Image (cartoon, rainbow, N blue to C red):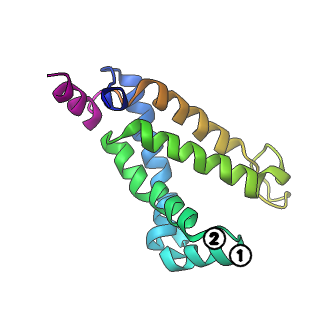
Amino acid sequence: MKGLFQTDDSWSNFILRVMMGLIMFPHGAQKLLGWYGGFGFSGTMGFFTEKMGLPWIIAFLVIMGESIGALMLIGGVLTRFVAASLAVIMVGAIWLVHLPTGFFMNWFGKQSGEGYEFHLLVITICAALVLCGGGKWSADRVIAKKLAR
């Protein structure tokens, strides 16, 4: 249990954690709240389950992971778990949606969709967070100190 929360006092993990949370939250807010042009919870659930054929529990976990999980990352709460969850979500996104388009994002609108380079960056940053924890000013660090007593 202690290993889940243990982290050092590094600025680099703090920066990775907070930026990943800030980057992922708008994607989650689209899915959960309908912000930023998104479809909201029911629209996203419908899309994932009816159009993509995902089980409802997977659709629900993706929505929660990208929204609530992003906020947890910002606060450094269960950093390793949330980062691993986001990495799994990104692997699923690559596999189910972006792999046929190729590596590059659709910068000039000439591809049939978006490539998976963004997703690989998210997976890589999340891997670093899984390995090292949330760093400076994370709730995990406070919890780890209390568990060590």
Query: Which span of residues is magenta-colored?
Result: 136-149
Q: Is residue 2 magenta?
A: no
Which numbered dot is residue 51?
A: 1
Q: Is residue 111 visible?
A: yes
User: Which element carries disc 1, helix, strand or loop?
Assistant: helix
Relative to 55, is 112 on the left or the right?
Answer: right
Residue 16, placed above or below residue 75: above
- What residue is at 56 percent from the left and 71 percent from the top? 56
Q: Main secondary structure of the magenta part?
A: helix
In three-dimensional space, the C-alpha distance between marks 1 and 2, rounded to whole angstroms, equals 6 Å
The answer to whether 43 appears left or right of 106 in the picture is left
The front one of 149 and 125 is: 149
Local packing at callout 1 (Cα closer than 10 Å; few below 14, some 14-19, many 20+) is few
Mark 1 residue type: Lys
Q: Is residue 108 above or below residue 145?
A: below
Side of 83 where 105 appears, left or right = right
> Which label was assigned to residue 48?
2
* Pointer 1 with pointer 2, Cβ within 8 A: yes
Q: Residue at x 14, y 22 (%)?
A: 149
Q: Position of residue 34 (x, y in %)?
A: 48, 74
Q: In x, y percent, where is residue 147?
A: 20, 28
**Residue 142 lies within the magenta run:** yes
User: Furthest residue to the left?
Assistant: 149
Picture quadrant where residue 87 is located: top right
Mark 2 residue crowding within 10 angstroms, few (<14) / some (14–19) / many (20+): some
Count the marks. 2
Q: Identify the secondary structure beneath mark 2.
A: helix
Q: Quick check: 17 left or right of 1?
A: right
**In the figure, 48 relative to 139: above or below?**
below
Residue type pointed to by label 2: Phe
